[in-house]
Amino acid sequence: MPRRKIRVTGAPEAPLRSALAALRTELGVRGAFPPEVQEAAERAAKAPALPAYDATDIPFFTLDPPASTDLDQATHLSRQGTGYRVRYAIADVAAFVVPGGALDAEALRRVNTLYFPDEKIPLHPTVLSEGAASLLPDQVRPAALWTIDLDADGRTGAVDVRRALVRSRAKLDYARVQRQIDAGTAEEPVALLKEIGEARERQEAERGGISLNVPEQEITERDHTYVLGYRAPLPAEGWNAQLSLLTGMAAADLMIAHGTGVLRTLPAAPDGAVARLRRTAVALHIDWPHHMSYAALIRTLDPHDTHHAAFLQECTALLRGAGYTVFRDGVLPAITTHAAVAAPYTHCTAPLRRLADRYAAEICLAAVAGQSPPDWVLDALDALPRRMADGARVAGTVERECVDIVEAALLKDRVGDVFDGCVVDVDEHRPTVGTVQLISPAVIGRIEGDRLPLGERLRVRLAQADPGTSKVLFTVA
């Protein structure tokens, strides 16, 4: 599920950042690594297990936000006959992490990188995740190298994955790439990002898949108050995301064909969740005809539009319920697809930030080699969904609490003000308590009142907003 992206700037001692620091303490989030883990990481950084296959002649590039240094993926795109060849190199964390060792044990505890609006708590020590294992430019790195051939329409053909040494030639960022492509000055392989990305987007539309272009909320401190702004994703970000989806789908197909794997699965959204989203669409003046599918509607939305941006934030709710499903010995699970992808899919492209990806890579490498996955993978497989679910709960708590803190900070000087909103949910056991979505700013908060007209617009008054002690609370005006 896409994270609700919120970025906070300002001095560490600013009230909002102080509240976020207090949240990390309250949740027991462990930032620093134990000495034995840090020492193991430093040793591993100096002596990784390197593969024999050398692919350093391929001019890979990475594409990430400008400040990113934990670079999981490097890309090379080329034409192949009438179609295309996608080479996608994924950081090989297993080259550094010994099964059963201190690094492995710590990764099993952490499960995911945790994202706070002002900083991140990494899965692996930064000497690896932002250093020796990261696909930084002009550095030789071990990787799982995917080679995926596509036809002229972007449909998948031959697939291969093997361990390889790779070397990125350039660390690119989305804004720069977008400018070059828009101006027609981008050269191959970068120029092919649009061509291949759009072809894959058309494939996604045909199968009924959904990609949410959720805007990033940015909170900045100005004149001792906080201001909310939005940054809509660039098309280049969507094209790049399609390469990750392509690889995850190819990996899932490999696992299914060879009878052992860990899939990322998501059942179809329940009717109640869709009905709730329709009420939000009405409140935000978004035209959603009853004959139009949710997937079709998403493709009509403009994340630059504030009403559409608010709606896209709510759309992430339909992606809740995703989990990891393991199978072995050729016995497939009842559900093999991810409803948003509209195809079998697995997580395999972010091993520096997500535990499951390291296991998925090993299973796929073994499948292509015609071998059984390593024993350490098979031994851990059955417990992996529960472990990932536990990690997801922690990440979800972090996200929810951060949103509450940030929204309280945004509104802290407006207690008593009246806003336009819509009640998008009412507690069935307590009809005087519900959830309200403001029209502007795109804040979602608790509301209390004797009459909460579900799905209707109404005026609401801000009763409380304190980022340090309480969440946002509204009442009917």
Image: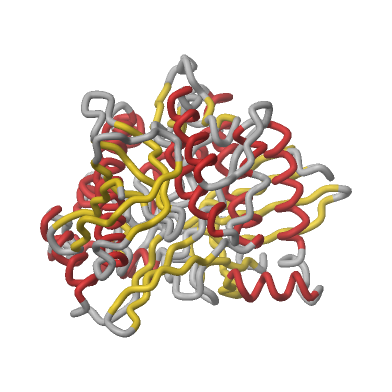
Q: Nearer the viewer, residue 10 or 448?
A: 448
Residue 464 x, y percent position in the rendering: 20, 57
The residue positioned farthest toward the right in the image shown: 82
Horizontal relation, residue 208 to residue 126: left or right: right
Q: Is residue 444 left or right of residue 286?
A: left
User: Residue at left 11%, top 56%?
Assistant: 26
Tell which of 245 and 162 is nearer to you.
245
Most extreme residue toward the bottom, as rendered? 223
Tell me if I can see residue 36 in this picture: no
Q: Nearer the viewer, residue 148 or 400?
A: 400
User: What colouring does the structure picture have?
Assistant: secondary structure
The one nearer the camera, 341 or 345, is 341
Q: Which residue is painted at 48% across and 45% down in the image? A: 348
Query: Compared to 56, does 198 lie above or below?
Result: above
**Could you tell me how many numbered marks the image carries?**
0
Q: Picture coordinates of residue 56 (x, y %)?
A: 61, 66
For image coordinates 50% across by 31% down, the residue present is 371
Where does the image place residue 368, in percent across and percent down from the top left?
Answer: 58, 36
The correct choice, above or below, for 151 with respect to 454 in the image is below
